[in-house]
Amino acid sequence: MSFRISKTPTCYHCDAEGTGREHVPPKCLFPKGGDWSGLMTVPSCVAHNNAHSKADDYLKFLLGAIALNIPGAITSSAARSVVRLAQMGSGNLHKYGFHRNGDVLVIDNVFSLDFELLSACLEKMARAIYFYHLSGRRKLLGDLQVWPLFIPIDPRIAPELASAVATVQASTAQDFEQHAKLGLHQDIFAYQVFEGPGSVAINMEFYRGHRVSVMGVAEQAVTRIGAGNAR
């Protein structure tokens, strides 16, 4: 563990000065037009402020495409994003389960998950939540293990992964049953933070049912004294 004096609030993700604010969760997950007062934000440097906007949109798309009971405004917004990609001639349509056949946009029954892009968003959120939860006193800077539990895993194709996911799903469900959820707009997003000897876990829940667990090593959380309040 290391300690360092900081005269100005620094970025939740590095030691650079926090010149902007990063929303956690991404603002794109909130339907437009609602009363979303009190959204969580953390200080962010230029490099990390909105650096993962593509990853945020990918998370929104996956929730809209895979999860149930998503607000219609979010599903519609995710669909419009894919249409815009098609209009721009993007070569990344396959990541969203689409391909072009001449002038026709075709929906694929099966598509490969871009785990790296999804993880970028969820790791960013976990680091920001941790920083926010501890009022800017500590940062989660080490490597993180991401478990997007709302993604279905076919045990016939990946039996070991499916078994591991089921174990984490059960543990996370128990956490949410036994401990309070945090967050002002829990219909959209709720979270939990657990820190014990040698480990940190951040649980997230989107739209009251679609969960993620992100795990890290406690010794890789660095304390900042005088970093200011994250809220």
Image (cartoon, rainbow, N blue to C red):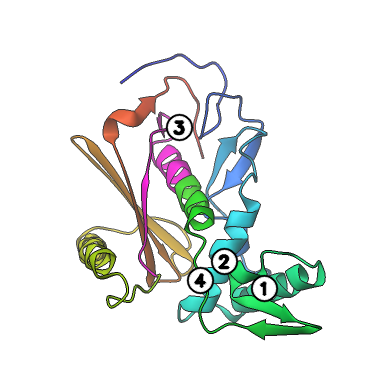
Q: Which mark is residue 77?
A: 1
Instruction: Report the span colored magenta.
Output: 126-150
Q: Are marks 2 and 1 in contact (CB under 8 Å)?
A: yes
Residue at 81%, 66% (x, y): give it: 88
- What's the CA distance linking mark 4 and mark 3? 29 Å
Q: Secondary structure at mark 3?
A: loop
226 part of magenta stretch:
no
Q: Amino acid at mark 4?
A: Leu
Q: Secondary structure at mark 1?
A: helix
- What's the CA distance linking mark 4 and mark 1? 11 Å
Q: Are marks 3 and 1 in contact (CB under 8 Å)?
A: no
Q: Residue 155 placed where, x, y %?
A: 27, 75
Q: Amino acid at mark 1?
A: Ser
Asked if residue 125 lies left or right of residue 219, the reply is right
Residue at 52%, 52% (x, y): give it: 121
Q: Residue 147 placed where, x, y %?
A: 35, 58
Nearer-the-camera pick, 10 or 215: 215
Q: Are marks 4 and 2 in contact (CB under 8 Å)?
A: yes
Q: Amino acid at mark 3?
A: Gly
Residue at 18%, 35% (x, y): give it: 197
Say which residue label 2 marks.
60
Nearer-the-camera pick, 32 or 1: 1
Say which residue label 3 marks.
136
Asked if residue 205 lies left or right of residue 159, the reply is right
Above or below, 5 relative to 204: above
Nearer-the-camera pick, 43 or 75: 75
- What's the CA distance linking mark 4 and mark 2? 5 Å
Q: Secondary structure at mark 2?
A: helix
Q: Residue 35 placed where, x, y %?
A: 61, 65
Q: Secondary structure at mark 4?
A: helix
Q: Residue 201 placed where, x, y %?
A: 30, 47
